[in-house]
Image (spheres, helix red, strand yellow):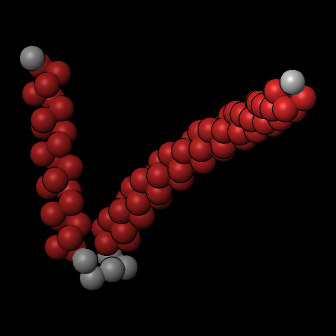
Amino acid sequence: MSNTLEAIHLLEDKLQSLLSNYEFLKKENEILLQNVTSLQHKLLEQEQKLVHQKKEYDLLKIAKTIDGSGTNTRDTKLKINTLIREIDKCIIQLQE
């Protein structure tokens, strides 16, 4: 009978330990999920910032070329033509 009680107590101790570990891991998982969400949000913000910076750079490059301070007039003309085509597409879509 003593062996049976010892086995039951040992089983209870192991079960308690497992439950404790489960709760700890559950909380740790929640924290990690929050961190992942936060990092994904920051990454998205940085990607949007990068896109905005690239647009500003392109506009500055065009402005300098138009100003005559650069030697990329061909690039500027191509960009202006591209912008005109995009505007034409927008006008067509608005007319439909």
Rendered view: 19 above or below 95: below
Percent x, y of residue 26: 70, 33
The quadrant of the picture occupied by the N terminus is top right
Q: Is residue 84 left or right of residue 70?
A: left
Q: Residue furthest right?
A: 2
Percent x, y of residue 60: 41, 64
Which residue sits at x=50%, y=45%? 44
Closest to the observer, 32 or 60: 32
Q: Residue 33 sits in which quadrant?
A: top right
The quadrant of the picture occupied by the C terminus is top left
Which residue sits at x=20%, y=56%? 80
Q: Can the viewer see residue 35? A: yes
Q: Residue 37 sits in which quadrant?
A: top right
Q: Can the viewer see residue 12? A: no
Image mark count: 0
Closest to the observer, 46 or 56: 46
Which residue sits at x=16%, y=47%? 84
Closest to the observer, 76 or 25: 25
Q: Is residue 34 left or right of residue 47?
A: right
Percent x, y of residue 89: 12, 35
Closest to the observer, 80 or 37: 37
Q: Residue furthest top?
A: 96
Which residue sits at x=17%, y=43%? 86
Q: Residue furthest bottom?
A: 71
Q: Residue 29 sits in which quadrant?
A: top right
